[in-house]
Amino acid sequence: MIDVTVARLAHIVRTTRETRVEVELNLDGQGTATISTGIPFFDHMLHQLARHGRFDLCLTCVGDLEIDGHHTVEDVGITLGQAFAKALGDKVGLVRYGHAYVPMDEALARAVVDFSGRPFVVYQVTNQRERIGTFEVELAEHFWHSFAQHAACTLHLEVLYGKNQHHILEATFKAAARALEEAVRRDPRITDVPSTKGLL
């Protein structure tokens, strides 16, 4: 039987010529977060991810924002995905699947996740404008692709309807958070890897 009281932690540092990202993650936390990427709206979204996923997250990134936000958002996605993969370990006892619907005023988002070991993203989110503050809206999709690739998960994100771009993106991050929180839970009834293959 698995010991569900053992915390699942990860500490990842990624340094390139473009960024330096450091992530500390506790999958079994309370939703506390310290975030600093230099992009205020992106920080706001990552706070939502931690809060509603109930992950404890300390994340800092120093990137080449004088160029644009692309490298920062991409490398944060990569590093956070690596942290999830490390914290999940061998995935014994993992629930594996999660889904959530989250409304934010007029916007409604759906997220479905499978920690299958097969990275794949379906992203059906309409961009109503190019920027929210200094955040380039198109980078939200790039973040999720980078995250899923390195977390080794399948992720479907869809906004069923919505008009306000802030509401649209915030609903997707909150829905993803709730789906991830469900998928990374451990169930003491599951005594092996949740796959007929015996491996994820």
Image (tube, rainbow, N blue to C red):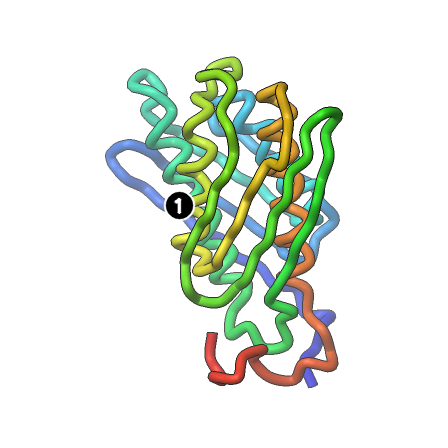
Q: Quadrant of the N terminus?
A: bottom right
Residue 190, percent from left and from top: 67, 81
Residue 24, percent from left and from top: 54, 48
Tally of marks: 1
Q: Hey, which quadrant is residue 183 in on the image?
A: bottom right
Residue 158, percent from left and from top: 56, 41
Residue at x-position 47% and y-position 83%: 197
Q: Hey, which quadrant is residue 96 in on the image?
A: bottom right
Residue at x-position 58% and y-position 30%: 169
Residue where numbered disc 1 is placed: 146
Which secondary structure lies at badge 1? Answer: helix
Of the pair 62 and 137, the residue shown nearer to us: 137
Q: Is residue 22 visible to us here?
A: no
Q: Hey, which quadrant is residue 159 in on the image?
A: top right
- Is 162 rendered above or below residue 10? above
- Is 4 rendered above or below residue 41? below
Q: Amino acid at mark 1?
A: Ser
* Residue lying furthest front: 161
Residue at x-position 52% and y-position 84%: 196
Of the pair 90 and 21, the residue shown nearer to us: 90
- Indicate left or right for 84 with 50 as reference: left
Crowd rating for badge 1 (residues with CA inside 10 Å; few <14, some 14–19, many 20+): many
Residue 100, percent from left and from top: 69, 49
* Residue lying furthest left: 17
Of the pair 105 and 160, the residue shown nearer to us: 160
- Is 104 rendered above or below residue 3? above
Of the pair 75 and 180, the residue shown nearer to us: 180
* Residue lying furthest top: 133
Q: Is residue 46 visible to us here?
A: yes
